[in-house]
Image: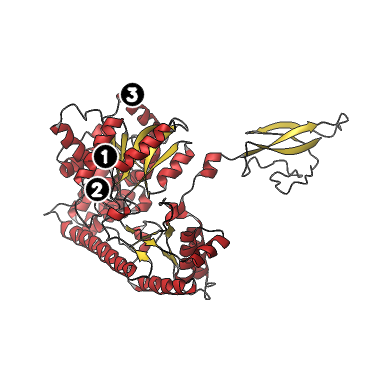
Amino acid sequence: MALSRVSASGACNRFTTLSRSSSSSSSTTSALTRFGLETVLLAKQPILRSSPLTYRTMSTSPRLRSLNIDNVNPHVRKAEYAVRGELAVRSEEYRAQLASGKGKDLPFDNVISANIGNPQQLDQKPITFFRQVLSLLEYPPLLEKEDVLLNQLGYKKDVIERAKWLLEQVGSVGAYSASTGPQGIKESIAKFIEKRDGHPADPSSIYLSAGASSGVNTLLHVICAGPKTGVLVPIPQYPLYTATLSLLDATCVPYYLDEANAWSTSASSITSALTTAKEAGTDVRAIAIINPGNPTGASLSYEDVESVIDLAASEHLVILADEVYQTNVFIGKFHSFKAVLRDMQKKTPGKYDTVELVSLHSVSKGIVGECGHRGGYFELCGFDPEVVAQIYKFVSISLCAPVIGQCLVELMVNPPNEGEPSYDLYKSERDGIFAGLQSRATALHKAFQAMEGVECGPPQGSMYLFPTITLSQKAIEAAKKDGKTPDAFYAMKMLEATGVCVVPGAGFGQKEGTLHFRTTFLAPGTEWVEGLAKFHEGFMAEYR
């Protein structure tokens, strides 16, 4: 039998049987096996191919590999997530070299992962109250040693009381919870939302999730119904949204933030993107808003939030309000979409009653920084009950979010209050973390402002800066020769010289003709900032 390979629509490859020998040996047993779009006749004897792109080879092994790069899900191939892309992989290689003692020739002695908002990897200390409660949840027999906890280990009475209460809610952190989360924890979240916004919150509309990312994944799965479904996404944006839309074979509808106006969100930019998408036949169903922004750090004014809600109401768009950085605001004040929506509903009865809003929050960011515990929640407002049932079904498929993460969400929304035993330490740690973030953001911004060809707006919030860089034609040509975009080329050279890993602006989307990179300001100290300035000066001189 002879086999040949043919192309299928430029994306998949299949093997097609061209001929079959009429004299098959009785010792040869063949089985017809189907792999996706591929059908191949398997035989014991090896089959040779002359094609250089050979992904399957016959051997004496009784089992062949089913998957190759051509037949895996094409939407997975298409998806990109620059935050953990090529530079992140290279930085981990450097980290491994340094750890093994083989990196003595590197021009740096440690790697700084400024590519991702991962506070505790960069030495942010966890909140004592949170971790003490979690320790008792993980090993409840410690509660039988209350005297030791109080008198020898520094635990406070409110730590012990909270741990006991949480154990009453979950039973055990090693057991599944209800799919949307324990009722008591959802009630704590509702009280937090009510206190923040000044409007009621319904615990039954709150869903615990494995971080905000899991919530986004759930909601986009329910919203998107094929390639003609569109979701408005801010550019630049956190690549979770574009990557998930690629996986779902849905359409990203980009609307551009205004860099000249502190990365503001304008209704006119959204309307323009919406009009273009509709003319192309896209069914635009939702709009994602990241507030404060990632990667820009920009915070929306009350009026900006109003204008987005008004547009969503007139265009029947679901609002996905990603508010995970709500406690990281340096300039102005955070305005939640839920609070503004309720204000608008009160001012104009009936007009905004059917606005569909999802608000997301997480323990990963803010002052908490507990990324690894994977805790978060989302709140639904204004959804059709039948759609809510589908969201519940989708969540139920994954059983529940990590229970220890759910407990951490409760601690985030219900920290020690003034007058309680743990309050003074909690307040000191919280204020210290916030002040440290703001101080480092200011220092990094000052350094960028002094660099040739770099412009950066003042830090407004979140934990990122997104400076724009202007590179020489010589640098651009060198990048092209190296097979990289200019910003990726610059970022790779930075990593190779300093050990600091950032993310090229192309990974978040940027206007044509502009170059950026995103960096966190989580790393302690100022030496690494000085190293960036020295690298930049040398880079600009080399490619002048």
Disc 3 crowd, CA 10 A, few/some/many (<14, 14-19, 20+)? few
Quadrant placement of the N terminus: top right
The three-letter amino acid code for the residue at tag 2 is: Leu
- The residues tagged by marks 2 and 1 sit, at their Cα atoms, a distance apart of 10 Å
Q: Which residue is at a point 35% across and 58% down the rendered structure image?
A: 466
Residue 155 lies left or right of residue 99; in this view the side is left
Dot 2 falls on a residue whose secondary structure is loop
- Asked whether the residues under the numbered discs 2 and 1 touch, taking CB atoms below 8 Å apart as contact, a structural biologist would say yes
**Along the line of sight, which residue is nearer the eye, 53 or 375?**
53
Q: Percent x, y for residue 101? A: 52, 72
Relative height, residue 230 to residue 482 (above, below): above
Secondary structure under the numbered disc 3 in the rendered image = helix
Residue 392 horizontal/vertical position (percent): 35, 30
Look at mark 2 in the image and give the residue it sits on.
Answer: 300
Which amino acid type corresponds to the residue marked 3 in the rendered image? Glu
Q: Earlier in the sequence, mark 2 or mark 1?
A: 2
Where on the picture, by quarter, is residue 215?
top left
Which residue, given by chain and number where applicable, does mark 1 sit on?
A: 308
Q: Is residue 175 above or below residue 477?
A: above
